Image: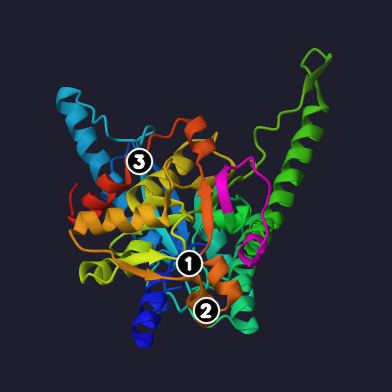
Amino acid sequence: MKRFATVLIGVSITAFAIPNISYNKENNSNNISSISTRMNQNHNPNQKVKKVLISGGSGFIGTALTKTLNEGNNNNNNNNNNNNNNNHNNNNNNNKDNVRYEIYKLVRRTPSSMYEIEWNPDKSFIDKESLESLQPDVVIHLAGENIMGIWTEEKKRKILESRTKGTSTLCEALSSISNPPKVFISASGCTYYGNNVYEPVDEYSPKGSGFFSDVVEKWEQSCDPLVKHNQQIINQQDTIANSVTTTTSSSGEVEVSPSSSSSLVKPTRIVNLRIGLVLDKAGGLLGSMYYPFLFGLGGVIGSGKQYLPWISLRDAVNVIKFAIENDQVNGPINLTSINPATNYEFTKTLGNVLNRPTFFWIPETPLRLVLGNDMSSETVLCSQRVLPRKLLNYGFRFQDTNLATTLDHIVNDKK
């Protein structure tokens, strides 16, 4: 029974904290061609091209995001053909500016193609020459150390530094290139609000307490090199806007006109994704719980009253795409559903969807004994009643707001 309880505990902690986004370490040592030789082929010449650079692009969220952006390219090409023939528009197409996305990835190895740029955040290294050649329009940072494992001080250091060093390395490099990206989107965590949140909180709520809350604060502060660079750009624009240019006409008259700042680079829009528990069978919370529940081993954890800030994978990906395409999206935004559920509600709903019993129960005491007080409080016993206030204000429309319907769609592969 003790072994069985340990298995249940291990299964349960997989994704009950900050986004469990880890590096995908591939082994391929082929040399790459220069990024500057990248050819834009097989796309509509009327489309604008946006170069998107992704870290963690082979992870859980990154893989789905890459697929969605590529599918959007295909849909756009089809829609353009239809428009040419019968002026037909796809109402589900959110790519309002007729953009084609070119996807590039940051990899922790020697790149194998011109779609990849090498970096090693552990050593604060990134190939700046390739980054300068590419000059991405959009950078999406999703990489970080996996939270699983025994929480030694060394493990906690890795969890923190993989996020802060990776983000600061990337931001320092982006601020040094001649044309910084238009938008930088970085993963963060809704654990910012603490681990004992039973009342609703949103982006305007204060920081909470706890290890992961501190991690998220430092994680977001790691964008500072880009923030400071933005301020320098704004100061330059203000200086130019307040200055004048004098010219002498052919008649000898001196003409005075305001200087233009239109030729200056623009500040980079920074978005921090405070990601909740992303639901899909491919990974995250549901990925770890699916088979135990399918075999009738699911059950409530602790009191069951702790809130889970869930969001479907397709909504999470659509939020990122929305953030790329909408200039008003800025600062921290919560990637959570509008209807967070308690652990009890989630357990019973998943059991009902799978038509499986959920009579097991894991009390708090053995959890704290096995995991330690810190880890249990920050993961399986953590309560986060987080709401996506800013997304709603921006006008984002969620596809998945009902937990039962969402789980049914996911586990039964419904579209």
The location of residue 148, given as percent across then percent down, is 48, 76
Q: How many marks?
A: 3
Q: Does the segment drawn in magenta span residue 95? A: no
Q: Is residue 125 visible?
A: no
Residue pictured at 48% horizontal, 78% vertical? 366
Residue pictured at 79% horizontal, 39% vertical? 235
Q: Residues within 10 Å of mark 1 (few under 14, many from 20)?
A: many
- Disc 1 and disc 2 in contact, CB within 8 angstroms: yes
Q: Give the residue at mark 1.
A: 380
Secondary structure under tag 3 reads loop
Q: Which residues are magenta?
A: 197-214
381 versus 44 height, above or below: below
Q: Give the residue at mark 3.
A: 401
300 versus 227 height, above or below: below
Q: Amino acid at mark 3?
A: Thr
Q: Give the residue at mark 2.
A: 371
Residue pictured at 67% horizontal, 39% vertical? 264
Secondary structure under tag 2 reads helix
How far apart are the alpha carbons under marks 3 and 2? 32 Å
How far apart are the alpha carbons under marks 1 and 2? 10 Å
108 versus 391 height, above or below: below
How far apart are the alpha carbons under marks 1 and 3? 23 Å
Q: Does the segment drawn in magenta span residue 201? A: yes
The location of residue 202, given as percent across then percent down, is 57, 42
Residue pictured at 52% horizontal, 47% vertical? 386
- Work out which quarter of the rendered image holds the N terminus and state it: bottom left
Q: Amino acid at mark 1?
A: Val
The location of residue 87, given as percent across then percent down, is 20, 23
Q: Amino acid at mark 2?
A: Leu
Q: Earlier in the sequence, mark 1 or mark 2?
A: 2
Foreground pick, 96 / 363: 363
